[in-house]
Every structure is written in C-alpha cells, then in structure tokens.
Amino acid sequence: MSLTQTKYAQAAPAPPNVMVIFGAGGDLTSRKLIPSLYYLFSADLLPENFAVIGLDRLDLDDDGFRALVAQQIASQVGAEFDRAVWDRLVARVHYMRIDMRSGPDYDLLCERLSRIDAERETDGNYLFYMAIPPSLFGEVNHHLGAAGLLHESEGDWRRVIIEKPFGRDLESAIALNNDLHRNMDEDQIYRIDHYLGKETVQNIMVFRFANSFFEPLWNRNHIDHMQITVAESVGVEHRGAYYEEAGATRDMIPNHLLVLLGFLAMEPPNSFQAKALRDEVNKVLDAIQPLTPEQVLTHAVRGQYGAGTMPNGERVQAYRASKGVDPKSHTETFAAIKLTMDNWRWAGVPFYLRTGKRLTAQYTEVAIQFKKAPTIMFQNTDVDQITPDMLVLRIQPNEGIQMSFSAKVPGPSMRVGTVNMDFCYEDYFGNKPATGYETLIYDCMKGDATLFKHADTVEKGWEIVQSVLDVWAALPPRDFPNYDAGTWGPCAAGDLTKNDGRLWRRIAVPKANGR
Ligand code: BG6
C-alpha cells in the first residue's frame, strides 16, 4: 500500500538507516531530496536513528554542506517552515568529498559509514541515492560492490535508488541493467520515476478502481481517444549539456508520459502489491505498437523552440542560444507521438502524447474524449452539432478532475451548450506541500518497491520510442527552430490530431491563482 494520504495518517517511521547521496552538490539534492527529507522528518516518518551523508567533489566539511543545503530550505518550504524541525534534521546531515571514479575513496567511505552507523545506531542499513549522470551509474555501483557496501547480511539492508534517464536507448538500458545485476539483486534496485510519487498520478488508479461509475465506460466502446499533455513553460535552464544529449523524447516519454499512460490504460490489478501493479503496467506497455519507421514520419512530430515571448510578456531566447547548447543543435525540445494498443480494451483508440519546453503554460493533464452521442433526436432543432463529453484529469498545477458535458441553454428554442463540473483537490484535502519524492524515499526505506520500476518496465519504455529515436537520428530536422517560445509547439503537432479528424484540447492558461 503506497498511497501517501492513507499512509501519512497512520504510518510508522521508516526503519533506522543512513541515506547516502551521490551527487549531493547538484540541483536535485537541494531542490528535491533535502526538502523531501524535511517533510518526512516533520511528519515523523523518519526514525530518530537516521543520518544523511552527501558525497560530491566539492571541498566542504559537514558544516559547509549543512550551510549549503540550508540556503534554500526556508523559502522552499514556505510559511510552514519550522526551524526546530530543521535543526534536528540538519544535525544528522554529514558530508564527504569523494572522487566517484576512484576505488580507494570507497574504502574511506566504508570507514566513514561504519562510524556514522555506530554513532547513530542505524543497524547497518544504507540507502544509496544516485543523483548523478547516468554515465556514472555503472561505475559507482561497481565500486560500491567491490567495497562490500552492497552486501546485505542477516538483519540489515542495502538499497540503491537510481534516477532517470536509465540509459539513453534500449541497448544501453539493457547493458546498464546487466551491469547493476552483477553487483546486486533486482530487489535491491529502486529505479525512480518521480511521476509515480505524485499524488494525482496515483489517484488515477483510485479514480478508476475505487469508483464504479466510469470503469464500465473505460474502453474502446465509449472512449474516442485520450490526450496526454505535459507542457513546460520553462526552458532548459542550466541543464543545456544534459538536454543536448537527451532531448524531449528521452527526457520525458519513455518514463513520465508512459507512467501516465500505464495507469490510464491498465486492467485492474489484483492488489497494490508491487508485482501485481508492475505486471499490469507491463501488459499495457507490451500492447503498445512500436511505430514502424514509415509510421514515425506520420505519427511522431518533433520541434525546437526559437526565441519568443511568454504569456507574462517575458522575452526569452531560443534553445540554440542556451548555455551548453550547440548553436546548430538538432535536439528536439518538443515531441508529440500517436500510439495505439493491440488489446481488447483499447483496439482502435489513439493515445496522443505531447511534451515540450517553453510552451505556453506549465501544465500537465490527461484529456479523455468520449464518443459523440447520436444527434438524431435534435434534427429540425437549432442544434447542429453536439460537442463530445470530455473528462480532464489535471495533474498539475491545481490538481483536480473536470467533466465537460452538454446541457440545454435556457430559453424557448432548443440550444445545447457545454458545461463543466470541476473538482479541486485543494478544496477537499488542502494543499499539502510535497516534492513527489517523499513517498518514494519513504517506500524505499520500508522496502516497498510498488512505485518503482522493474528492469523490464524500463526496457519496454525504451522499446516503444526506439524507432522514433532511430528515424530522427537518421533524418536530421531541416526546419529547426520550428516553434516560437510561448506557443503550443510546432504546427505539425496540430496536424497529428487534425489528420484523424480530431483536435488537441484547447488549454486555457491557468490564471495567477492557478484556477
Ligand atoms: C524531469 C525532466 O524528469 O522532469 C525535466 O528531466 C522536467 O526536464 C521534469 O522538467 C518535469 O517534472 P515535473 O514534476 O515538474 O512535471
């Protein structure tokens, strides 16, 4: 059982452990990991016998590192920041300078960990968090293995959380999995995808399977198509070098967007146990038809942003002008793809996925369009067409669910308009600050792998996008940049749905208060 709301209400603290963060000087540590630990600590979900040790190349001591992570925490947590909680947490934070490629440094790490373990009585349990570039995963794990740090003895555990991207294509993901399996068992590996930690993503399952009214309609007989939009208004910021290698497709589709698709399309699992859930997600991924090279030309669209003006009036530079980016870069900052599934429930139902940087809004949603109702009874009235019903699952911001359907417009003649019913999480459950990483870190400490990815799930994700990556690599784009920053992406993305007689849902840019 991994649903935060339930768990937070009755959950016990995680078992004693030391969390070892590789890449502690990076962005992820200060933006996500430390705030997550703060939230867990303040919810009494971390044990008293707990410590963190940050590892990186920066020349710092414990106090220096504590000062570094303290810089942003108050502003990140906001009004609810509790100095006393932070002081108790930060006293458990340590730092060690390390060259991650050097074997002898891992012997020093062993000694340091033994000391912390003895002082804090953490029972020899270590959680290694790989907040480092994927190119280092294999080597670091090899050194950890050689130093005996991955060896579990009676009564203690050693676990490794690995960040995405897991490889850069199918071949490298398989090689990385094989490499990791040389040093540890599959049940020690926790491949993280922070979309699995988002409350609203998990809620897709609750919405579908804890209610009985939509599930009978959740199939090809009633659903015309689904659209998944993960739009970002931010650019590549300081991650130009990483992004040049990744691009929008690798960065988002085989991981985050397919997580959403998996939950939307899965059959009801028998339980919330890791295996039951993974099996169902894997069946969905198995049923997705990878595009043939010919289909890539018509079913997938790429784009790269040029300079433009964002809706708030800010003038922003082109991707090619970003730091760390080749001025002639062919890397896509936008990708849209149409997928179909070969199974009984979804045969013939297209799933349109799109994601990109520097789009009009920072906004993630799933739009489920139902089939049109027959209009026979409205013949000889003023109604010439009826808009199909739509269900929108808003993932972020302003998490909620909206249903759009037809209603009679008051008046003497028969006219039909579209109306909305809207549910906002915040109205019912308040706005609990969270990074999405809390659940996942806590679950890993408890040994619950339900919301982590198995080796084969990751490989299946790559399999689905591999032909797109191959065709795009073989045919460099001729028209980049092909969309202005601040728009909804290249025109060709519109054709993807238009050619099927459909349209992307028009997303109203959320107002300042998120509504
Ligand atoms: C990360 C990607 O995994 O997810 C980023 O590397 C992206 O490029 C981010 O911005 C989006 O996450 P979220 O939680 O802001 O939707």
Image: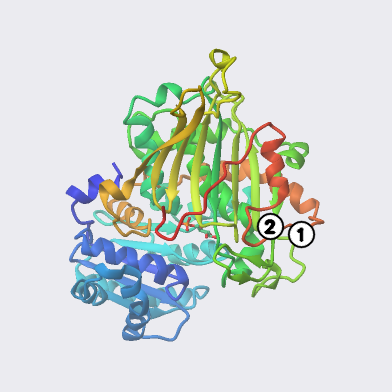
Name the element at disc 1.
Answer: loop
Count of numbered labels shown in the rendering: 2
Residue 40 vs residue 52, the one in the foreground:
40
Q: Amino acid at mark 2?
A: Glu
459 lies above or below 64:
above
Residue 51 falls left or right of residue 223: left
Q: Residue at x 62, y 41 (%)?
A: 464
Name the element at disc 2.
Answer: loop
The answer to whether marks 2 and 1 mark residues whose Cβ atoms lie closer than 8 Å is: yes
Using the image, tell me which numbered label, if any, was put on residue 324. Answer: none
Q: Is residue 192 visible?
A: no
Distance Cα–Cα, label 2 vs label 1: 8 Å
Q: Quadrant of residue 70?
A: bottom left
Residue 132 vs residue 429, the one in the foreground:
429
Q: Closer to us: mark 2 or mark 1?
A: 1
Q: Position of residue 244 (x, y in %)?
A: 66, 65
Task: Determine the residue located farthest toward the front in the rendered image.
Answer: 412
Q: Amino acid at mark 1?
A: Phe
374 lies above or below 178:
above
Q: Which residue is mark 2?
A: 332
Q: Quadrant of residue 422?
A: top left
Residue 417 falls left or right of residue 469: left
Q: Position of residue 228 (x, y in %)?
A: 54, 42
Q: Position of residue 151 (x, y in %)?
A: 36, 58
Residue 302 vs residue 279, the one in the foreground:
302
Q: Residue at x 21, y 60 (%)?
A: 43
Q: Which residue is mark 1?
A: 480
